[in-house]
Amino acid sequence: MTETLAQTATVERTSTPRRYLMCRPEHYTVSYEINPWMDVTRFTDRDLAVQQWETLYRTYLDWGHTVDLIDPIPGLPDMVYAANGATVVDGVVYSAQFRYAERAPEGPAYEQWFADAGFTTHTAREVNEGEGDILLVGDVFLAGHGFRTDRSSHGELASLVGREVVSLELVDPHYYHLDTALAVIDGDAEQPLVAYFPPAFSEESRRVLEEMYPDAIIATERDAVALGLNAVSDGRRVVLAPGATDLAEALRDRGFEPFAVDTSELLKGGGGAKCCTLEIRDAR
Ligand code: ARG
């Protein structure tokens, strides 16, 4: 056991340049409740949210990544959670169709941004919340359902992009999006690495994950409640919530560099670093 850890720690991890889309939380507040983290009676500090978001944004820039920005729209406080805005692979954009009316206008807003940026966009027929529930791991998409995204969208996505889509059922309302329960740590490795919190998944989906990723990092409850799985990895450096200390240690053991960014104010809306970050994968 000790030997295996020592061996894996010596693995050289390589970061690859990324392109992200983000939305500054200028209109951030919690004015409705669509997940268990949201509480309209609790005070939200917009300026602090902006500050924390800026730290995340600067971190990506410091690491040499490209970050595009979409203009925030008044009355759409959740627009800061850019990951939900679409799914983009090979330069193809699969739009989001939000579950709740409060967020519905975000789908077309994000789709318009991509169209203006020269991307081919496809308006989804089925309900899906973008990269909140649809994560690319190597060549395969993992796609959540149970709370937000309809399973029918998984088939729609598969036929659009011509890639395998593996459906995973979420069962705990606190982990209502796949990206709150599973993090892609290294999708490009020969043996892709993910981290996840098993209790967030149905038994059957847990079995699927165990089979696909026998070496996965199993997150603890402490990691999960800090929304630590809402992490962003560039293949070497991993941004995550400061409270996810077990996950940070597990990452270090495997040769990654965990980097804590406090997004506590954005957690009041039920999101963390990954929620604020939509990955744009250009045509290869
Ligand atoms: N308040 C937002 C919602 O409930 C938070 C979205 C978090 N985004 C994410 N990718 N998990 O829809």
Image: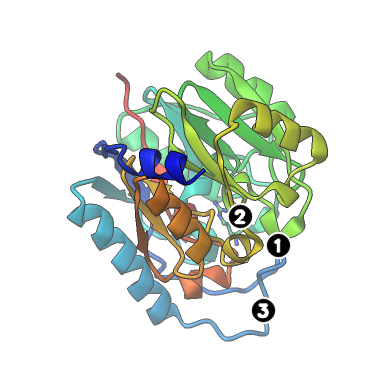
Task: Give the residue type at disc 2.
Answer: Arg
- Say above or below: 202 vs 221: above
Q: Determine contact: label 2, label 1, CB under 8 Å.
A: yes
The residue beneath circle 1 is 34
The residue beneath circle 2 is 103
CA gap between label 3 and label 2 equals 16 Å
Q: In the structure shown, which secondary structural element does the residue marked by tag 1 occupy?
A: loop
The residue beneath circle 3 is 40
Q: Determine contact: label 1, label 3, CB under 8 Å.
A: no
Q: Residue at x 59, y 73 (%)?
A: 30
Front-lying residue, 247 or 49: 247
CA gap between label 1 and label 3 equals 10 Å
Q: Residue at x 53, y 50 (%)?
A: 106
- Say above or below: 184 vs 122: below
CA gap between label 2 and label 1 equals 10 Å
Q: Tell which circle, 1 or 3, labels the residue nearer the N-terminal end.
A: 1
Residue 19's spot in the image, x, y percent?
A: 29, 40
Residue 101's spot in the image, x, y percent?
A: 68, 54
* 86 lies left or right of 212: left
Depth check, mark 2 against mark 1: the one in front is 1
- Say above or below: 146 vs 243: above
Q: Determine contact: label 3, label 2, CB under 8 Å.
A: no
* 109 lies left or right of 150: left
Q: Tell which circle, 2 or 1, labels the residue nearer the N-terminal end.
A: 1
Front-lying residue, 75 or 184: 184
